Amino acid sequence: MIYASRLYISGEIKCDECGRPIPYPDRYLAVDEKDGKEDDEGETKRYCVECCLKKGYAHYKEEKGEKILTFF
Ligand SMILES: [Zn+2]
């Protein structure tokens, strides 16, 4: 299960990949992962947009000359 752009109001969120704090209300992805793969039984990991792009969880697509970030 992938939860895109879920926002938490309190508490600092850190990216589980690069360790960078994810500033509210920045976007990040929470994904259940086991052994580096998406798995509902796994641990919940949070990734910043940059790491989502690196891991292939997020993509930029061009629409009407604008870059739109999509998660899946
Ligand atoms: Zn990151």
Image (tube, rainbow, N blue to C red):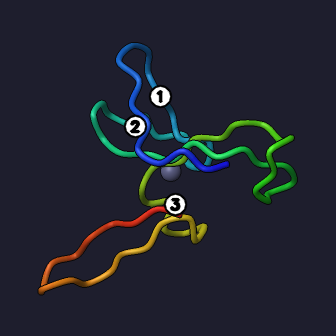
Residue 25: image location, x then y, percent = 27, 34
Q: Is mark 3 within 8 Å of ligand 1?
A: yes
Is the residue 70 above or below the residue 63 in the image?
Answer: above
Which residue is the site of mark 3?
52
Q: Quadrant of residue 21?
A: top left
CA separation, marks 1 and 2? 5 Å
Q: Quadrant of residue 10?
A: top left
Residue receiving disc 1:
13
Amino acid at pointer 1: Ile
Apparent side of residue 66 relative to residue 15 in the rendered image (left or right): left
Q: Which element is circle 2 on?
A: strand
Q: Is residue 36 left or right of residue 67?
A: right
Inspect the image, locate mark 2, and give the three-letter code of the amino acid beneath it.
Ile
Mark sitting earlier along the chain (1/3)? 1
- The residue carrying pointer 2 sits among few (fewer than 14), some (14 to 19) or many (20 or more) residues within 10 Å by Cα, namely some
Tag 3: residue type? Cys
Q: Which residue is mark 2?
A: 22
Tell which circle, 1 or 2, labels the residue nearer the N-terminal end: 1
State how far apart marks 1 and 3 are (Cα).
15 Å
Residue lying at the far top of the rendered structure: 10
Disc 1 crowd rating (10 Å Cα; few below 14, some 14-19, many 20+) is some
Lower position in the chain sequence, tag 2 or tag 3: 2
Q: Regarding mark 1 in the picture, which secondary structure is present there?
A: strand
